[in-house]
């Protein structure tokens, strides 16, 4: 009875005005936001300003040194419809997709397999993690120079090794052949990135409660069924993250191709990607920068491709996560 009475009583609302915090305490609370200022300034100078400038430049023609006249979408129309710009753009765009697909099936697959092995009862885990991560610490220019020596068609270690073991028919100019140059560079890129991807997958695997795996084993899950029904769903967030990062990296790639094959993406544009095509138009054209508007148009299209594809991938992975 007493409980019923207490529940029907109206709540007591205090009409006493709240006491304001001391001025010093309120100022300190707002001053905390100033710590974000350096990061905001750096982000604005090195991210937003170049992006906004590229968008503006893409709507202007250039006289070689400065913006000339407003041309609307003419640079985009020229790039996507007129020869030889259209053919070069499509070829470079295709190479970016090949770069992403090969990287996905080599770097991420091998990195995940290594993470599974290291996450098991393997001795010397720290040693293997260090060994696999070391290539990530090397400069891209250094990696390009080293592999240019290793893949030298006459004195490179790869061809010398193949000839030594009797596989002469496989020895070839890996970077000088139009059919092997792009895949060779992608494999080098994957080799350099395996360590980082492996650490991401390993951290995700180690965060999963081991009792889940024990319960799955008791229920009869082993081998492939354990991998696809238990392990992969539990680390799907890291798979999503690495897939998106790999896609962005594949469409932003430039340094390794520039270091090994130059801005022309040789031989005969077989390793040309949107990054090198942008560089040639914006900074390396014979017209002395007259094509900077076209180069800016490539930068804008590249940004839109990455933004749209990343949004689609995020939506897909979140939907898969919701269905689980």
Image (cartoon, helix red, strand yellow):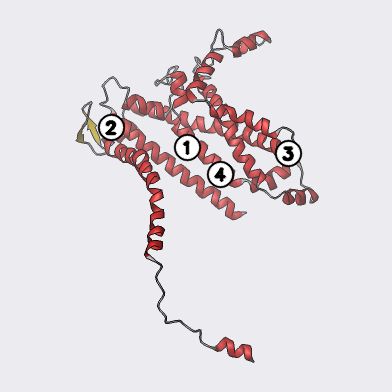
The disc label shown at residue 248, or none: 1
Task: Tell me if label 2 and label 4 are in contact, CB under 8 Å.
Answer: no
The residue at which mark 2 appears reads as 293
Foreground residue among 309 and 33: 33
The disc, 1 or 3, on the residue closer to the chain's N-terminal end is 3
The residue at which mark 3 appears reads as 120
- Give the image location of residue 292, x and y in percent: 28, 29
Cα separation, mark 1 vs mark 4, equals 12 Å
- Give the image location of residue 298, x and y in percent: 35, 33
Question: What residue lies at 75% left-to-right and 50% top-to-bottom?
Answer: 216
- Give the image location of residue 74, x and y in percent: 26, 35
The disc, 3 or 4, on the residue closer to the chain's N-terminal end is 3
Q: State left or right for residue 84 relative to residue 2.
A: left
The disc label shown at residue 240, or none: 4
Q: Is residue 43 above or below residue 180?
A: below
Cα separation, mark 3 vs mark 4, equals 23 Å
For the residue carrying disc 1, how many other residues have a C-alpha within 10 Å: few (<14), some (14-19), or many (20+)? Answer: some
Q: Secondary structure at mark 1?
A: helix
For the residue carrying disc 3, how many other residues have a C-alpha within 10 Å: few (<14), some (14-19), or many (20+)? Answer: few
Is residue 258 visible to us here? yes
Q: Secondary structure at mark 2?
A: helix
Cα separation, mark 3 vs mark 2, equals 54 Å
Q: Quadrant of the C terminus?
A: bottom right
Quadrant of res 126: top right
């Amino acid at each position: 009875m007493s409980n019923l009475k207490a529940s029907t009583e109206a709540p007591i609302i205090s009409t006493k005005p709240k006491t304001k915090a001391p001025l010093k305490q309120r100022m300190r609370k707002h001053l905390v936001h100033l710590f974000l200022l350096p990061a905001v300034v750096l982000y604005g100078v090195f991210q937003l300003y170049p992006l906004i400038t590229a968008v503006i430049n893409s709507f202007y023609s250039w006289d070689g040194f400065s913006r000339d006249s407003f041309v609307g979408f003419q640079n985009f129309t020229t790039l996507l419809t007129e020869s030889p710009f259209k053919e070069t753009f499509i070829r470079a765009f295709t190479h970016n997709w090949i770069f992403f697909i090969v990287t996905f099936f080599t770097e991420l697959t091998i990195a995940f397999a290594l993470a599974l092995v290291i996450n098991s009862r393997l001795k010397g885990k720290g040693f293997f993690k260090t060994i696999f991560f070391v290539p990530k610490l090397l400069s891209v220019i250094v990696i390009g120079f080293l592999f240019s020596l290793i893949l030298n068609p006459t004195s490179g270690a790869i061809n010398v090794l193949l000839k030594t073991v009797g596989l002469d028919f496989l020895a070839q100019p890996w970077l000088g052949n139009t059919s092997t140059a792009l895949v060779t560079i992608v494999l080098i890129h994957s080799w350099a990135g395996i360590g980082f991807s492996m650490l991401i997958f390993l951290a995700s695997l180690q965060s999963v409660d081991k009792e889940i795996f024990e319960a799955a084993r008791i229920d009869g899950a082993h081998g492939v069924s354990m991998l696809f029904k238990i392990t992969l769903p539990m680390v799907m967030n890291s798979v999503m993250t690495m897939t998106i990062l790999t896609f962005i990296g594949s469409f932003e790639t430039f340094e390794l191709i520039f270091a090994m094959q130059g801005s022309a993406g040789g031989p005969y544009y077989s390793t040309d990607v949107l990054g090198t095509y942008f560089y040639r138009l914006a900074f390396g054209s014979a017209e002395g920068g007259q094509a900077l508007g076209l180069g800016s148009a490539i930068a804008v299209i590249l940004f839109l491709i990455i933004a749209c594809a990343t949004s689609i991938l995020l939506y897909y992975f979140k939907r898969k996560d919701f269905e689980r």
